[in-house]
Structure formats: C-alpha cells, structure tokens
Amino acid sequence: MFLNVSQLTIRYPGAAQPAVDGVSLGLAAGDIGVLIGPSGCGKTTLLRAVAGLERVSAGSIALAQDTVSSAEVHLPAEQRRIGMVFQDYALFPHLDVERNIGFGLRHLGSRERAARVREVLELVGLGGLQARYPHELSGGQQQRVALARALAPSPRLLLLDEPFSNLDVDLRERLAHEVRGILKAANATALFVTHDQLEAFAIGDVIGVMHQGHLHQWANAYELYHRPATRFVAEFIGHGVFAPARIHQHGGEVVVHTPLGDLQDVEECPLPSAYEAGLCDVLLRADDIIHDDEAPAKAQIVRKSFRGSEFLYTLRLPSGDMVMTHVPSHHNHAVGEWIGIRAAVDHVVTFERGAGAGAPPAPGVPVVHGIGNAPVA
C-alpha cells in the first residue's frame, strides 16, 4: 500500500474522547480513497494528520513505506510532497490563473514553469485560460484551477477537503465525476473528505465510513451498501430500515422470518445459533421492497418524497413496522393509501436485535452476515 495508516489515534488536550481512535486503512498507488461520515466524526482530523498538520498520539502514518508520523516521528508538512485542495480553493485573487498554478513551481525556470502550467491546465480542461483571474471564472472553473495548482508540483499524494461544498448540488456530482477522470489521467493517489454520499460514490475507489473517531468500514461502494460491516454503516449509507426477524432452520434450509414473509434461498445466511433464539434485525433497503398490487402483503403510505423519476414511499405494515420503497413516479399514490408490496432481498444483512448504531466496530476484522460476504478489513 502506498498510504498506510496503522492504529492511528489523535487526542486533543482536555478532550474526553480521541478525535481519531485506532484507525487503520491502506490506499494503493493510483487509487482514490474517500472518508465520509457525519460532522465531528474525525475525518478531517485524519486528513490533516496525513498532511502533517496534526501530530498523532499513537499509531503511525507511512507514505511509500516511509513513516512520516508516529508518537516519535513527525515529518513537517512541507517535506511530505503532499498537495492539498481546500474547501474555499484558497486562490490568490490578485494573481491570474498562470501565476496561481505556478506558485508552487518557483524552483523551475520560467520556460519550464509555463510549460507545466499549460500541461495541467489541459489536464483539467481549462486550456487557454491562463490569463484569467479567479473572479472571472465560475465556481467549477475555480475548483479546477485549485486542482491544477495542487497537481502541478507532481505530489506523491493529493488531499482534498470537501472541495465541492461551496457548489450547487447538480454541479457537485458532475464535477466529482470529472475530477475522478482528471485524477485517473494524472495517475494520482488521492484521499478525499466529504459528507455527501453521492460525491463519495462518484469519485472513490474505496470509501471509509467514520463515526465518533472510529473507522467502521473501508470498502468499495457496493460492499458498503450491500454488506455493511456495522449497524451504523447500514443506517448511514442509503435508505433503509431494520425490521425484527427470526432465523430458523426449515428442513435443510435456513429461513429468515420477517414481517413481509420468509426470505429463503439465502446463501451464507448465519445459522440460528448466531443470535439468541435466532432473533435479530434484518436490514431492508428501499430497493429490497417492490410495489406489487397483486402481492398479499399490504402497507399504508405514511410519507412520500417526489424524486422526479420516482417516489420514495415510507410505509407502515399492519404489524406497525416501517419499510421504505422506491416506486416509479407514475405510481402516484396518496398518503394514507394501502398498496401491495413484496420483499425481493438479494443481500440478507442481519444484526443483533436492538443493537445501537453508534457502537464502534469490534476489535480486529469486522464480520458481516450476508450473502457472498467475506470479512471486510
């Protein structure tokens, strides 16, 4: 791994809990990692520690197998060859684009510097704009200039701290896709912080979900969504609810009994002995619930959110349990109406009945109970 964070802990004086608590992760050269989580979860503190802007209390950070941070070692930020893109872009308003990008290239001759500026401007799709000033650029263009400036010195690692938060929602996701393409074209290794799931999914090869200083899971977007390692990840990523369930053996098959009926043919589902009396909670995603007028199970619409091509319905079952479902928007049912639904669960994910979402991952490798699941580091 090019970036290796091992059992990293960061404590601030007077704080009751560490800002970062025992976090370990690895990032391969050329990959884009994303840290996501609620405000105050420790993701920006972790990014700043990698940059050399925060000292660590325990654990270590290594770049290309060279330890740059530990309780005994602290390589200054300016010696780490790390580029940073900040939330506010930090462009110099009195300098044109060429001089903004060339600011970190003063060790080069004027001809070499101008050539490198042109090269990175072409890379970010802003060729020919080197004479413009920041106020003459759109927000998205300013963001690309900030990215070009960070890439210009050829850093060995690029760090991006919520770089799209000042942009409108539609532009954020589009720019995330574009920035991913730019970083891949530059063969850059990058670590990115955001609170927006769509950004994380659009840009990241691997995504880390943090909560209260703990890293709950470090995996690709598909694994996070379908095989969450902890209850917090299951609740934080995507739309879904937990429903009470019981796992039991029926002949040679394991069956998960839920308020929507039995889930069968569930390969690698945990045995009933995994939970006391087989009682557990099963995760039901909105895309696990299908609107079907012919289905015997009925549910009442208690809330609806129009999403353009679809509605997100929140439904109450006769048992009182709640589920959610995505329904094409031409199925425009009224709040209070009863509709038919059925479960179509391809990834059965279960957790201990009533377990708290905020519980940190268990020491060592967290294991998820689910179809096709392998332990997630």
Image (tube, helix red, strand yellow):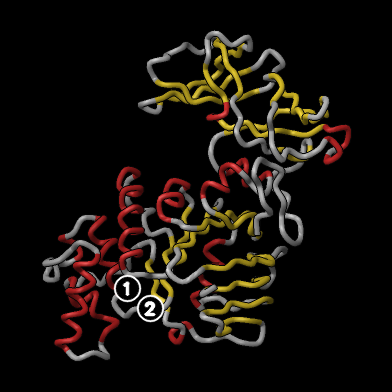
Q: Residues within 10 Å of mark 1 (few under 14, many from 20)?
A: many
The span from disc 1 to disc 2 (Cα, nearest Å) is 6 Å
Q: Residue at x 34, y 52 (%)?
A: 177
Q: Is residue 95 in view from this perspective?
A: no
Give x and y (percent) for residue 278.
84, 33
Give the image quarter of residue 365. Answer: bottom right
Residue 9 placement, left or right of 37: right
Front residue (pair 20, 184):
184
Residue 273's disc is: none
Give the image quarter of residue 369. Answer: top right
Q: Is residue 146 above or below residue 353?
A: below
Give x and y (percent) for residue 223.
57, 48
Q: Residue tagged by mark 2?
A: 155
Give the image quarter of residue 93. Answer: bottom left
Give x and y (percent) for residue 132.
13, 67
Q: In the rendered view of the protein, which quadrant contains the C terminus?
A: bottom right
Q: In the rendered view of the protein, which quadrant contains the N terminus?
A: bottom right
Q: Is residue 30 in view from this perspective?
A: yes
| Type of the residue with mark 2 | Pro
Q: Residue at x 23, y 79 (%)?
A: 102
SS at mark 1? helix
Q: Is residue 257 above or below residue 356?
A: above
Front residue (pair 8, 277):
277
| Type of the residue with mark 1 | Leu
Q: Residue tagged by mark 1?
A: 151
Q: Residue at x 15, y 66 (%)?
A: 127
**Which residue in the rendered view is the most extreme toward the front?**
252
Q: Residue at x 18, y 59 (%)?
A: 137
Q: Are marks 1 and 2 in contact (CB under 8 Å)?
A: yes
SS at mark 2? loop
Give x and y (percent) for residue 92.
25, 72
Residue 320 placement, left or right of 226: right
